[in-house]
Amino acid sequence: MSSENSLSVVVLAGGISHERDVSLRSGRRVADELAAAGHRVTLLDPGAGTLATILEAGPDVVWPALHGASGEDGALQALLGARGIHYLGSGPHAASLAWSKPTAKILVDRAGIKTAPWISMPRETFRELGAGGVIVELAAAVGTPSVVKPAQGGSAQGVTIVADESDLPRALVDAYTYSDVALVEQKIEGTELAISIIDTGDGPEALPAVEIEPVSGVYSFEARYNAGETTFYAPARVSDEVAARASEVALQVHQVLGLRHVSRIDVIVDAAGEVWFLEANMIPGTTETSLFPQAIEAAGRSLADTYGALAEFAARG
């Protein structure tokens, strides 16, 4: 890329969320690929003077690689937008919708997309109604096996597969470590797929689905970020018909939630070939084991060219 077309890009990575280390790894990888594409990159770990630093630098575009609330709940996007700073990713309203797993499930369900039956349970409910009774009703309503997860957050932190009702209290405690609201949903058995969406100016496009096969059977935090603990298939080992249906669902979710530029939509395909929505991620991870870069490479594209094209489109506003 000629220096005339080179962009000034600030990549935000790190922050103070539980996913700080993952964010730092994502940010470094993005910064390296953008530099390889010929852009001028500043990697910035957010702190008290971050907004002033960005305003003073006047970058063409900001690329948030912040995982967790500091980058994905919409607050950062609202502040950047208020000052007219262009940034990659969804706007504040869409970000807040995707950040709340129960909200995303409600909107997706209303759009006619399958998602597992669930109950969202605030921590305060146990104090008001009594833990014993609430546990019994949750188990009866959702059944087992079930999945308990924080209502906000990523990287599978605080997520537990509950095989027996007796495991439910501990699973809820783990979820409440990361959020004041837990999501308890029926576990759908099947093949887990991640479908990444990109838009470099010609409209949202679904990349090849990546199939996830954890060695332990659970796609935990360790299985996501430790090499060798998960086998990935990119593209996924599913029929063309199932792959097309999963892509269609992912694109529909992207649109229903109002997401922009990039997203990763996680789904489960059951034995009958039905596609069930799990959750949406508006800032997909870009570490060496992350699903988003695997999808780009499965599409026969280079990371540098793709990240560069995304930054250039985002810089247009």
Image: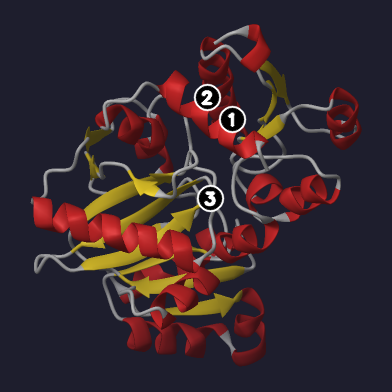
Q: Is residue 76 left or right of residue 193?
A: right
Residue 308 is labelled as 2
Where residue 52 sits in the image (x, y, percent)? 91, 33
**Disc 2 and disc 1 in contact, CB within 8 angstroms:** yes
Asked if residue 199 shows in the view, the reply is yes
Residue occupying the far top of the picture? 2
- Looking at the picture, how far across and down is residue 17, in whole percent? 67, 43
Q: Secondary structure at mark 3?
A: loop
Which residue is under mark 1? 312
Q: Is residue 92 left or right of residue 105?
A: right
Residue under the point 44% across and 44% down: 202
Q: Amino acid at mark 1?
A: Glu
Report the quarter where the N terminus lies. Answer: top right
- Helix, strand or loop at label 1? It is helix
Q: Which of pointers 2 and 3 lies earlier in the amino acid sequence? A: 3
- Residue 316 position within the rendered picture, expressed as x and y whole percent measured from the top left: 66, 38
As shown in the figure, which amino acid type bears the numbered disc 3? Met
Residue located beneath label 3 in the image: 282
Q: Residues within 10 Å of mark 2 (few under 14, many from 20)?
A: many
